[in-house]
Image: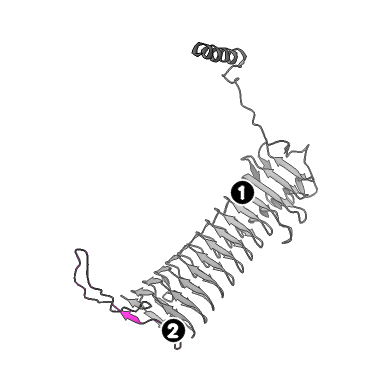
Amino acid sequence: MQRAASLIVGGLMCGVNAFAGPITPPSGPVVSTPGPEPRIAINATNTPGDADSVYRISQSGSYYLAGHVTAAPGKRCIEIGASNVTIDLNGFTVIGVGGSIAGIGVDHAHSNLTVRNGVVENCPGRGVDLRDVWSSFGHVVENVTVRSCGIGILVGSNAIIRNCISTNNAAEGIVAGNYASVTECVARENGWIGIAANDGSTVSGCSAGLNASAGILVGTGSTVEGCASKSNLGHGIQGGNGSLVVSCAASANGLTGVFVLSDSTVTGCTVYRNTSDGIAVNSDCDVRNNNCNENGFGAGSGAGIVASGSDIRVEGNHCSDNDWGIRALFAGNIIVRNTCSGNTTANWDLVSNNVFGPIVNRSAPGSAAVLGDSATSSLGSTDANANFTY
């Protein structure tokens, strides 16, 4: 049986050797396969332009670039004239010129458009503009870099923007309509807002820096999670009513680190050295477990947290070395389990008729050194809701 098996294996190996082709590839360049098929190359033959476009896609389908393309004055370089279109830039660049309308744009409100895998640059109009009106929906832009355009990336509602970079644009870096998802994107050195997403949107894992207005701006009922916003001239992160800002970092912004309107939640954030306040909220907000340090930096008027309304819960936050620690400018709020230290004007500024746990001053607790396994408390209070100055 062993001999029979050996003969069978040997026969199979001989068959493989007999019918296999050469394993050394032929000389010369390897021609790429556009796949998955069928896909259509964007060129003058397949996608001829018209009065306002260099290339125009007039039918639904999947398209790709086979090389760099250049726009023309008064035209879109690639114009999309149908819904249900996918464009793979294949790593190539759409290059704008003076007076060009857009690198990639639409002629009317088309939906379910996808642009991926390439670069759009130097379009004085817009880089990637898939939103003729807000009613267009279902767009996807992924793995695209847009730089030195008017607006970087502009999409309608129900859209996804992921793994994109938008830099040095004259206005906004990224703009999305309602119910959008913007993930793992970078918006830097744009002439207005870095990332703007309308109502019901989610912005996550993004970085916004050195923009001339807000770093990240979202509308009503939106979420900003795990984002970093630094050195923007406006607010670092700005949210509409009912927004959620969680696990974000906002530092060195020209206004407030995190600013949200009523009915919002800010939790687990680090805000540092913003020119105005660290966190500023309106009525009916929940502000918990944030770290707010050195805000009011260089201006002398910033608080770690400022509650500008009523029915706000401020709990479990740490505010140190700001101009003010925690400020409640209106009555009807609850302030518990917070710590403040080294805030230069005052650690606490709470108007009358607020509810708060005792504020215990332990700035000089006088505790003995500890070396070992146990020690008596130096907190000065056993109240579970106490706030501490130290």
State whether residue 101 is above or below residue 87.
below
The 10 Å Cα crowd at callout 1, few under 14, some 14 to 19, many 20 or more, is many
Residue lying farthest to the bottom in this orientation: 352
Residue at 66% x, 37% y: name it: 67
Q: Is residue 243 visible?
A: yes
State whether residue 281 is above or below residue 109.
below
Residues shaded magenta: 351-376
Nearest the viewer among 175 and 146 is 175
Residue 299 as seen in the image, left or right of residue 81 = left
Residue lying farthest to the front in this orientation: 1
Q: Which mark is residue 142?
A: 1
Sequence-first disc among 1 and 2: 1
Mark 1–mark 2 Cα distance, whole angstroms, equals 48 Å
Q: Name the image quarter holding the C terminus.
A: bottom left
Q: Which residue is mark 2?
A: 355
State whether residue 341 is above or below residue 350.
above
- The three-letter code of the residue at mark 2 reads Val
Q: Residue 18 location in percent, x, y?
A: 60, 12
